Image (spheres, helix red, strand yellow):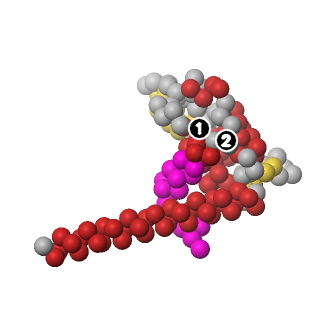
């Protein structure tokens, strides 16, 4: 059975984000349309569904590792801090946003806290993520089969 490791990050995150949005269980804070995702950013995200995408990315990251804290997630989602005419440096993303994403995923049972304050994937969460990964793999196979059939029809003509 294919798992999260077997498919591309981009495909999995898009599929899991749409699953989270469709299910309606993920509690999205009221401030998501106003907030920047880091102090180094100039503008808020353009994508109105960015919270679902971030939640999917966080869930995948924690699935691939055993125990992850908020600090590691802020480093992961950080970026380039443009400092005018001085050289750019890496800056961490907002810890509050990462914490709220983790808390929302904990409420729906995907993550659980560990003794040292980090987060890990729960049994239910692991099952959900594997199910989504399997669905993505099947969808890719169906697309490839359709493309092959179309190619064969063009060759016949």
80 in magenta: no
Q: Give the main secondary structure, helix, strand or loop, of the magenta stretch.
A: helix
Q: Quadrant of the N terminus?
A: bottom right
Tag 1–tag 2 contact (CB < 8 Å): yes
Give the secondary structure at mark 1: helix
Drawn side of residue 138 relative to residue 57, left or right: left
Mark 2 neighbour density, 10 Å: few (under 14) some (14–19) many (20 or more): some
Which of marks 2 and 1 precedes in the sequence? 2
Q: Secondary structure at mark 2?
A: loop
Q: Position of residue 46 (x, y in %)?
A: 47, 31
Residue visible at 41% across and 67% down?
A: 142
**Quadrant of the drawing holding the C terminus:** bottom left
- Expressed as whole percent of the image width and height from the top left, the position of residue 105 reads 71, 45
Residue to which mark 2 is pinned: 26
Judge whether residue 145 can be spotted in this image: yes
Whether the magenta-drawn stretch holds residue 5 is answered as yes
Give the label, 1 or 2, closer to the camera. 2
From which residue to which does the magenta span run? Answer: 1-19
Q: Nearer the viewer, residue 9 or 86?
A: 9
User: Label 1 to label 2, Cα distance in Å?
Assistant: 10 Å
Q: Is residue 16 above or below residue 7?
A: above
The numbered mark at residue 25 is none
Q: Quadrant of residue 28?
A: top right
Q: Position of residue 120 (x, y in %)?
A: 75, 54
> Does 54 appear above or below 33?
below
The residue wearing badge 1 is 51
Which residue is depicted at the point 36% across and 71% down? 145
């Amino acid at each position: 059975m294919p798992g999260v490791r077997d498919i591309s990050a981009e495909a999995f995150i898009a599929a899991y984000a749409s699953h989270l949005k469709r299910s309606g269980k993920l509690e999205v804070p009221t401030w998501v349309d106003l907030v920047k995702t880091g102090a180094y950013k100039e503008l808020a995200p353009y994508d109105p569904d960015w919270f679902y995408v971030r939640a999917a990315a966080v869930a995948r990251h924690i699935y691939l590792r055993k125990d992850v804290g908020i600090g590691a997630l802020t480093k992961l989602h950080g970026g380039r801090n443009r400092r005018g005419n001085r050289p750019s440096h890496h800056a961490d993303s907002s810890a509050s946003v990462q914490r709220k994403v983790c808390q929302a995923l904990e409420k729906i049972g995907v993550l659980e806290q560990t003794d040292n304050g980090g987060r890990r994937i729960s049994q239910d969460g692991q099952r959900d993520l594997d199910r989504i990964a399997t669905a993505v793999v099947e969808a890719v196979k169906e697309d490839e089969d359709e493309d092959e059939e179309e190619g064969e029809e063009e060759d016949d003509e």
